[in-house]
Image (cartoon, rainbow, N blue to C red):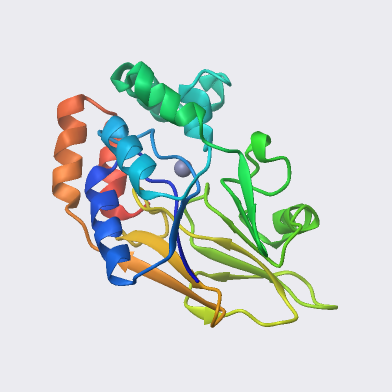
């Protein structure tokens, strides 16, 4: 089976459309969305509808959780908070209902899917390094876990008798003896100095994990953000991939 994993779209319809078109070429069996469909970008409602139609799994991200009013936006920085307020104004009751149906996490055979860390998914812990991965692995009940949240394509692995290792996201084959926690990167706001949209395909028959990068029309996305009056810092970071 081939599984496509997308995360952190953040209202970027240009990036999402390019990624879904690219996914079609790979003839996958399932598409899983790991959350943060909204927030930051100019097309939250259109992205929600597209994800709702295209994906087999739809997980809650911290931006959905906040837009739904399930937690205070005071945990966000100024730009993110302004974007949450703007996003809430764009969403209809129907859009809110789509988000409210998103699951916190999902177990599929030997795969576990979650937005942030497997440790307390509703606390949205980040997993940036090996130290933070320790508790995440302790709470991972499967051989392989996929997450988003940091927007950084990263592979954490743990072999028998070995310390946890982290590597930048790259195409590789999973080993029998190891466990993995894989950050699939971000579709709509990459932060690893590569402005192209990022997603992953996992082929369970071959054990292959492929990272894909896709060019999209960044200028169009930025113009829409400017027209919407979204914070400048959010507009400029798209072109830098930061
Ligand atoms: Zn995010």
Task: Give residue 6's quadrant in the image.
Answer: bottom left
Residue drawn at point x = 32 percent, y = 64 percent: 23
Q: Position of residue 36 (x, y in %)?
A: 45, 40
User: Residue 88: in sight, yes or no?
Assistant: no
Q: Residue furthest right?
A: 161
Q: Position of residue 107 (x, y in %)?
A: 65, 53
From the viewer's side, name the closer residue of 184 and 92. Answer: 92
Q: How many marks?
A: 0
Residue drawn at point x = 14 percent, y = 38 percent: 223
Residue 222 against residue 25 in the figure, above or below: above
Task: Give residue 129's quadrant in the image.
Answer: bottom right
In the displayed structure image, the side of residue 20 where residue 126 appears, left or right? right
Q: Position of residue 39 (x, y in %)?
A: 38, 33
Task: Give residue 132's quadrant in the image.
Answer: bottom right
Residue 190 against residue 120 in the figure, above or below: below
Q: Position of residue 205 (x, y in %)?
A: 55, 79
In the displayed structure image, the side of residue 214 where residue 142 appears, left or right? right
User: Residue 110: in sight, yes or no?
Assistant: yes
In the displayed structure image, the side of residue 200 where residue 132 appears, left or right? right
Residue 166 against residue 176 in the figure, above or below: above
Residue drawn at point x = 82 percent, y = 78 percent: 160
Residue drawn at point x = 68 percent, y = 71 percent: 157
């Amino acid at each position: 089976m081939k599984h496509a994993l997308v995360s952190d779209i953040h209202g970027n319809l240009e990036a999402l459309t390019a990624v879904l078109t690219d996914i079609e070429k790979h003839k996958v069996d399932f598409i899983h969305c790991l959350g943060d469909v909204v927030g930051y970008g100019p097309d939250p409602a259109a992205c929600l509808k597209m994800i709702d139609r295209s994906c087999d799994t739809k997980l809650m991200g911290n931006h959905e959780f906040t837009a739904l009013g399930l937690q205070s936006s005071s945990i966000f920085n100024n730009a993110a908070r302004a974007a949450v307020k703007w996003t809430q104004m764009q969403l209809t009751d129907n859009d809110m209902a789509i988000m409210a149906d998103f699951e916190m996490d999902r177990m599929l055979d030997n795969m576990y899917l979650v937005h942030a860390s497997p440790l307390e998914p509703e606390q949205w812990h980040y997993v940036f390094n090996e130290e933070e991965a320790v508790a995440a692995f302790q709470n991972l009940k499967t051989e392989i876990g996929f997450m988003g949240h940091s927007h950084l394509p990263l592979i954490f692995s743990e072999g028998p008798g070995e310390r946890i290792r982290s590597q930048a996201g790259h195409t590789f084959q999973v080993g029998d003896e190891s466990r993995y926690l894989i950050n699939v990167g971000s579709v709509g706001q990459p932060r690893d100095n590569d402005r192209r949209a990022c997603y992953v395909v996992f082929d369970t028959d071959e054990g292959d994990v492929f990272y894909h990068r896709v060019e999209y029309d960044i200028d169009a996305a930025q113009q829409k953000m400017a027209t919407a009056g979204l914070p400048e810092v959010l507009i400029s970071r798209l072109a830098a991939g930061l």
